[in-house]
Amino acid sequence: MRRKYTAFRAHVNCSQLEIGLLPSSIPCVKTFMIAGLGNPGPEYDETRHNVGFMAVNAIGHSFKVRRFNHNRLADWAAVELPLCGEPEPLKVLLVKPRTFMNSSGIAIAAMVQEHRIPLEHLIVIHDEMDLPVGTVRISFNASAAGHNGIRSIIESCQSKAFIRVRIGIEKPRSKAGTIDFVLSRFSRSEEDAILGVIAKATAIVESIMCEGIMAAQSMFNQRTARD
């Protein structure tokens, strides 16, 4: 699969924010953590379960991150960016857990605590079998709905009050083949769809951080025939 992504950017305007109770409606918060879920190791590169890693890699490229730091829990990078039209830069922490998918919460909870990230400023990007390949859904304070990585985060952080960007990978034809399916790579016919949504990853998180979750949902959430 091609590894170069053409960034898709959407205009964001902090003066047109929704004012409400959702934490994402707060304009231009100072710090966000963007965590992509996946499994470490080259054998898992660009598999369906690793679309979160793919998205964070693309975001890091757009944000001109030269390299990720490494510790036993995660690969991570911290950047300060002139986003949202604010005089002070926005601080963004990019994280790829090394604890494997089903224990993602161990790494994320530790990074949230170490860097003092408000949980409502955590954006988790992950795969979603209940959506067609390349479809995006942005949500807040949602249940794990069977996703083991999200369940681990909820358990470790003792809360589900964080933002999720769900990227569709489609369902396997049989439940018996679920593990093999999520660890498989995308077919040639699916490449354009998945590369297209990965290319939009930077625009999606910038919209969430600058305009709020409702504006981002309106712009990027896609309805499907299953709705």
Image (cartoon, helix red, strand yellow):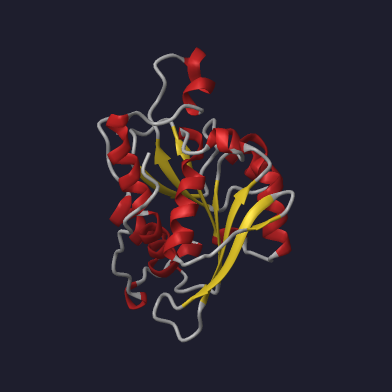
* Image coords of residue 115 (percent x, y): 69, 65
Question: Is residue 115 something one can see in this rendering?
Answer: yes
Rendered view: 195 above or below 208:
above
* Image coords of residue 204 (percent x, y): 38, 57
Count of numbered labels shown in the rendering: 0
- Displayed quadrant of residue 191: top left
Rendered view: 104 above or below 74:
above
Q: Is residue 79 left or right of residue 222?
A: right
- Tell me the residue at 51%/46% (across/down): 53
- Tell me the residue at 67%/51% (across/down): 74
- Tell me the residue at 62%/58% (across/down): 76
Q: Is residue 50 left or right of residue 190?
A: right
Identify the image quadrant of the C terminus.
top left
Identify the image quadrant of the N terminus.
top left
Rendered view: 128 above or below 116:
above
* Image coords of residue 77 (percent x, y): 60, 62
Q: Looking at the image, which residue sits at the far bottom?
A: 87
Question: Is residue 226 something one can see in this rendering?
Answer: no
Q: Looking at the image, which residue sits at the far left?
A: 225
Q: Is residue 51 left or right of residue 33?
A: left
* Image coords of residue 212 (percent x, y): 41, 64
- Tell me the residue at 54%/40% (across/down): 143
Comparing 20 with 13, the one in front is 13
